[in-house]
Image (spheres, rainbow, N blue to C red):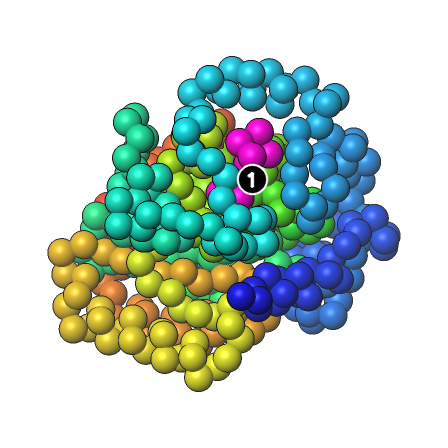
Amino acid sequence: MFDWRALSLFITLLAASSVLAQPHISKRSKAKRSDPNQECTPYYYPPSEQYIHKFPPIWQPATLLPNDSAGQAMWTKISGSIPTNIQPKGQPGDSTANVNYNSQKDPDCWWTKTQCTKPKLKGLPLDVASIPEPRSMGYGFDDGPNCSHNAFYDYLASQNQKATMYFIGSNVLNWPREAQRALADGHEICVHTWSHHYMTAFQSRDAFAELWYSLQAVKAVVGVTPTCWRPPYGDVDDRIRAIANALGLRTIMWKYDSNDWRAVPSEVDASYNSFVHSATAGEFNTVGAIMLTHELNTFTMQEAMKWYPQLKSAFKYIVPVGVALNKTRPYEEGNHLLPTFQQYTSGQTTVG
């Protein structure tokens, strides 16, 4: 089965192949640009020279670099806790390719086949696929930071709306100023792997590298170390969960899909409309919802802005996932905090 989403992602990000092509621009001037053609012109970011050699090739499946002593030490530390009875599945481009799996028994809690979010391996926390607050939405966007996101981030700021941003490590290095804006605007940052491949297809050491280098990229560029992640395509099983958990990462999933990545307006509008209808019909009166949406390209962000008023009318509260979980310390570092759910819904959308 051909993966049109993977092709769309590749085409969208092809222009972002170098951050060293144009003169350096300041964070302030970068944030003021709103013409996508200007925004997506590769630019020079001086700190890149200091750390670019510490990462695998951008947009290539990650492997643990031999000169990465910290990464090697971390892998040695956690590797003994990773199950060896769960084997890699398929290929990085399609984890289901030529795979025979007992979906009825689902021994690995493999979401791609069964939408399982309750790990069967002892010691692993539940995936977050919904939020505990009733009539509320856990708001977030995959695949960023996108080079043309200024208009979208400006809109969120105008609404005093914060969200959870699931950043791809390669994108963070390609578009460092954009990644920095997310934190400056008060959004929660989680990671979305280094190269956006199907995670269960990787050998454990390489799956570790996908998460490790996405964390290191955010730390190098933004200055914080996230404690949450979302698997590309939702492709996760208990082996991958164990690796993420050992790195201090909570797995964030979803139960509803906007299908915005398909870039078919009628399909996207139908998905949003169905979600809004479910909310107004009372489906989330007991437990809140998470919907899959993307910072993938101008289209997905325009759809998000178009549908935001309807979402705001349908839900009592729209909050970042970490806020819904009352997770006030979203990063290993304690210098950036999230408000509690009560604080956020009372109007205090940032606390530090």
Q: Is residue 19 left or right of residue 113?
A: right
How far across and how far down the image is residue 71, in percent?
A: 62, 23
Secondary structure of the residue carrying numbered label 1:
loop
- Asked if the magenta segment contains residue 206, the reply would be yes
For the record, the magenta segment spans: 200-207
- The answer to which quarter of the image holds residue 304 is bottom left
Q: In percent of the image, x 81 and y 36: which residue is there?
A: 49
Crowding around mark 1 (Cα neighbors within 10 Å: few <14, some 14 to 19, many 20+) is many
Residue annotated with mark 1: 202
- The answer to which quarter of the image holds residue 281 is bottom left
How far across and how far down the image is residue 104, in percent?
A: 26, 50
Q: Amino acid at mark 1?
A: Phe
Nearer the observer, 57 or 104: 104
Q: Is residue 131 left or right of residue 267?
A: left
In the depicted structure, whether residue 259 falls above or below residue 115: below
Is residue 327 visible in the rendered image? The answer is yes
How far across and how far down the image is residue 233, in percent?
A: 47, 55
Q: In percent of the image, x 53 and y 48: which residue is there?
A: 90
Q: Is residue 21 left or right of residue 177?
A: right
Nearer the observer, 332 or 250: 250
- Asked if the magenta segment contains residue 46, the reply would be no
Q: Quadrant of the C terminus?
A: top left
Is residue 232 visible in the rendered image? The answer is no
In the depicted structure, whether residue 115 falls above or below residue 221: below
Q: In percent of the image, x 57 and y 29: which residue is there?
A: 205
Q: In percent of the image, x 56 and y 21: which residue is there?
A: 75
How far across and how far down the image is residue 1, in percent?
A: 53, 66
